[in-house]
Image (cartoon, rainbow, N blue to C red):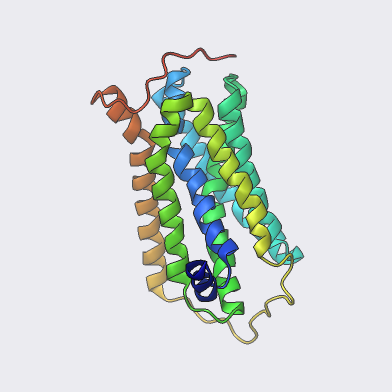
Amino acid sequence: MSVLLALRNHFGSMRLVALQLFSTAGLGMVYPYINLYLTEIGFSGTLIGTLASAGAILTLAATPVLNQIADRLLIHRWLLMFYYGGFALAAVIFATSQHYWLVIVGVLLFRMTTGPSMTLGAQLTLSQLLRSGKTIFGQMRSFSALGFACASALAGSVFALGGYSLTFSVGAILSLISVQLSTIFPAKPKEKAKAETGPKRRRHLGIYVLAASQFFVAMCTHNAFAFLFIHMSQNLDVAIACSGPEKLDT
């Protein structure tokens, strides 16, 4: 008990710590098996790559619009809960349905919610820590890495017990828990951020170099992870998932 009290005093809220753990644990449970599941129900590598690209384009188009709405209405907490709920819905679709178009909707929903939820969650966490006068953002976010690592390590055991259905269901449950934990953030900020006045300053050229580098890093790592587990399973004979052939409903 004394250890828990010490942690609470240091981090400000154990619910905030739990949110970091559970929000990425759901991703760690689901992410390694999505593309393997798609191949087993008959999706080709070309289609999987196309869906990944389509999800990225939809994310690029929708995220700024949703962020602008959240800024205007001060509903950032609701937007974060929407992202976690969307991820949970995608996981439920994977767990319960093999209908062609429904699975495609699940894939796109998964792609559109994972990245933005992590970014918005980090922003709200930083704001919450600043309000409480704590400068421990790096320590707090380390729990996100811990949650993802632990869930990824346990995913194999969960899959061995119940296959894709149980694995995706556990991921959905973890994400739904994150929805409830998100209430740690205030429903609305006390006041809107004031717009800067005066002449606009020119952006430093380095920001464009950084943006370009982040674009290529994200593109390459995403493409690598998209087919890494498929390559290991089909070409290297690594027993990642062995649930047997599935039939796709059309």
Quadrant in the picture for residue 69: bottom right
Furthest toward the front, the residue is 1
Res 65 seen here = no
Q: In this view, does 4 lie to the left or right of 88?
A: left
Vertical placement of residue 84 versus 203, above or below: above
Q: In this view, does 184 lie above or below 147?
A: below
Image-quadrant location for residue 80: bottom right
Q: Nearer the viewer, residue 30 or 197?
A: 30
Q: Position of residue 135 (x, y in %)?
A: 49, 78
Quick check: 207 left or right of 239? right
**x, y percent for residue 233:** 31, 26
Residue in the image at 52% along x and 72% along y: 11
Tell me if 221 is positioned left or right of 123 in this view. left
Q: Position of residue 71 (x, y in %)?
A: 69, 65
- Residue at the far bottom in the pictured view: 198
Front-lying residue, 126 or 242: 242
Estimate the x, y position of residue 120 in percent, counting from the top left.
57, 60
| Residue 202 appears in the picture as rendered | yes
104 left or right of 231?
A: right
- Report the quarter where the C terminus lies: top right
Give the residue drawn at x 63%, y 56%: 181
Task: Please name the residue shown 60% across and 24% down the image.
Answer: 96
